Image (cartoon, rainbow, N blue to C red):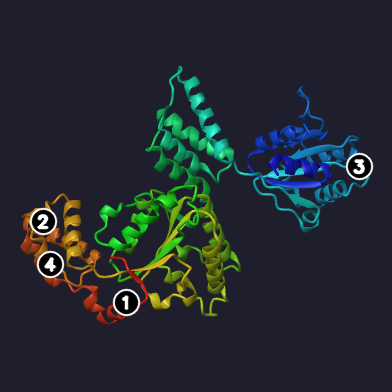
């Protein structure tokens, strides 16, 4: 059934109390006006500024009551014709005993007609006695056809306000924008579309990053998600050839709203590996490879000393990520948030967080691709590692010779230094056992040394810096060797 039919059915059933949580009051009023085409009732709207006013007639009637809620509810009880009463500002008064009593008596039809009270607001919390009498009705989010119509309306509005200048439209970008506006209320989607169109009079590929940022700012009410503005491309990542190929195979399926027969959307990967070998950069590159925004969830900010707040924070963060779909959700250093799940020292909070997270991983339908990274794999709970939680578990190992050469090439070029001036094979050979982060730091330290000596960076300075550095694979040799041996038969090499 349609949204309009569902609402008409509630009115025909003489539902006494309906709750609609939405900031879009205008849409609620319009929806009830359409309902009246099939159900005969008088329609009233009450606000604290205007009082009670009838809104189903062609004429504009004056307010029937003062803006006071008590006076309004008494007036409703006295009406001798069944009506629908949209109470827009009632939420702040629901804590008063007199307000609760009057609403309950109207809902129970004590000495009054079979009226329908509709409580409208961004958040409406009912006392238990009223909750038992109420039906909560959720407005459906607009589909792609409604969103496309809205974007075209805004384009026409731009044309009218700019002396007939037409909006330049890239059809592919328009399709992507409409798809990315899904999950928003029509009023919110309209504000974003208007911002994109009126900023430069075009609808193009350059609008997509701005749309992602605006949508994130709108939906991230919890503050536990972080929008990563700088995603990477796989061309910026040395090595990881198997991971790149795996993502490349799934890009078209993830980007397409219509799934090919027999295929489920890719859900996510777990990246394990030696510290500094590029797991975080790989997460950014996955978002760039899919061409979608990257959200980072910091598990450390979720934990709260009050009972139930930590789990609520996780639910809110994951819900926000689903509304931002399609996107990549990056969970960095996962073991720090879930490692103590087997402990009872925190009152079972970590166990409940893990349980909810595992359920969400298994049951979510939205196109949120999870990239979880971890260094201390043995601290992760076994439930998280079993097959099916993630599509694949990749191990990011220390880079081999060819990859170390490419890392030197990338970091030299990033600093506007011509790599051909250096003997990259000799540098890569001297950096055996170094992670990508350690190679980058060697380049940075060498630049400081060259600057202090008043000369350009050269091969000898780089080699000297490499010889003075003790990489993690030497400092923590036993731990690194143990991790690599554990991963050898349990994971897929990323390179």
Instruction: Let me know if residue 218 appears in the view.
Output: yes
Residue at the limit of the structure toward the front, as seen here: 261
In this rendering, the answer to whether 401 lies above or below 253 is below
Marks 2, 1: nearer the viewer: 1
Foreground disc of the pair 2, 4: 4
Q: Find disc 3 in the rendering and name its residue.
A: 112
Q: Earlier in the sequence, mark 2 or mark 1?
A: 2
Mark 2 vs mark 3, CA separation in Å:
88 Å
Q: Which residue is mark 2?
A: 451
On screen, residue 323 versus residue 240, left or right, reads right
Looking at the picture, how far across and down is residue 9, in whole percent? 78, 43
Measured Cα–Cα span from mark 4 to mark 3 = 88 Å
Q: Earlier in the sequence, mark 4 or mark 3?
A: 3
Label 4 SS: helix
Marks 3/1: CA–CA distance: 76 Å
Q: Quadrant of the N terminus?
A: top right
**Left or right of 342 in this view: 308:** right
Q: Residues within 10 Å of mark 1 (few under 14, many from 20)?
A: few
Query: Which residue occupies 49% across, 27% down?
Result: 155
Label 1 sits on a secondary structure element that is helix
In the image, residue 197 sits, relative to residue 389, either above or below, namely: above
Which residue in the structure is indicated by mark 4? 465
Considering depth in this image, is 193 or 447 the residue closer to the camera? Answer: 193
Q: Kindly report which numbered mark, 3 or 1, lies closer to the viewer in this rendering.
A: 1
* Neighbours of disc 2 within 10 Å: few (<14), some (14-19), many (20+): few
Mark in front: 2 vs 3: 3
């Amino acid at each position: 059934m349609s949204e309009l039919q569902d609402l008409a059915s509630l009115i025909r059933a003489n539902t006494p109390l309906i709750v609609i949580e939405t900031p879009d009051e205008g849409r609620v009023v319009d929806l009830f006006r359409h309902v009246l085409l099939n159900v005969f009732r008088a329609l009233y709207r009450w606000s604290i500024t205007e009082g009670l006013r009838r809104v189903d007639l062609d004429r504009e009637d004056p307010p029937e009551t003062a803006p006071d809620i008590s006076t309004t509810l008494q007036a409703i009880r006295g009406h001798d014709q069944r009506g629908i009463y949209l109470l827009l500002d009632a939420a702040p008064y629901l804590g008063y005993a007199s307000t609760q009593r009057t609403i309950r008596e109207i809902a129970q039809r004590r000495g009054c007609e079979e009226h329908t009270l509709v409580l409208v607001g961004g958040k409406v919390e009912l006392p238990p006695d009223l909750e038992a009498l109420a039906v909560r009705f959720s407005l459906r989010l607009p589909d792609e056809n409604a969103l496309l119509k809205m974007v075209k309306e805004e384009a026409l509005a731009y044309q009218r306000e700019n002396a007939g200048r037409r909006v330049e439209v890239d059809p592919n970008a328009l399709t992507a924008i409409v798809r990315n506006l899904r999950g928003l209320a029509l009023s919110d989607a309209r504000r974003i579309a208007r911002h994109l169109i009126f900023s430069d009079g075009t609808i193009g590929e350059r609008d997509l990053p701005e749309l992602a940022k605006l949508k994130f700012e709108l939906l991230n009410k919890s503050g536990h998600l972080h929008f990563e503005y700088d995603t990477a491309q796989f061309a910026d990542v040395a090595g990881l050839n198997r991971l790149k190929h795996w993502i490349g195979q799934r890009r078209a399926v993830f980007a397409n709203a219509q799934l090919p027969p027999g295929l489920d959307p890719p859900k996510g990967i777990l990246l394990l590996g030696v510290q500094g070998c590029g797991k975080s950069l790989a997460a950014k590159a996955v978002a760039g490879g899919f061409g979608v925004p990257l959200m980072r969830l910091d598990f450390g900010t979720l934990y709260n000393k009050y009972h139930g707040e930590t789990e609520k924070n996780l639910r809110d963060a994951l819900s926000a990520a689903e509304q931002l779909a399609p996107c990549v959700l990056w969970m960095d250093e996962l073991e720090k948030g879930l490692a103590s799940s087997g402990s009872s020292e925190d009152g079972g909070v970590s166990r409940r967080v893990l349980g909810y997270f595992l359920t969400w991983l298994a049951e979510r339908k939205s196109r949120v691709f999870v990239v979880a990274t971890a260094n201390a794999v043995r601290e992760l709970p076994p439930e998280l590692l079993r097959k099916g939680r993630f599509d694949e578990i990749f191990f990011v190992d220390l880079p081999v010779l060819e990859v170390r050469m490419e890392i030197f090439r990338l970091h030299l070029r990033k600093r506007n230094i011509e790599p051909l001036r250096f003997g990259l094979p000799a540098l890569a050979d001297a950096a055996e056992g170094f992670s990508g982060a350690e190679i980058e730091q060697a380049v940075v330290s060498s630049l400081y040394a060259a600057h202090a000596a008043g000369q350009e960076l050269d091969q000898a300075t780089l080699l000297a810096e490499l010889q003075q550095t003790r990489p993690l694979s030497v400092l923590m040799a036993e731990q690194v060797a143990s991790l690599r041996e554990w991963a050898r038969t349990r994971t897929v090499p990323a390179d």
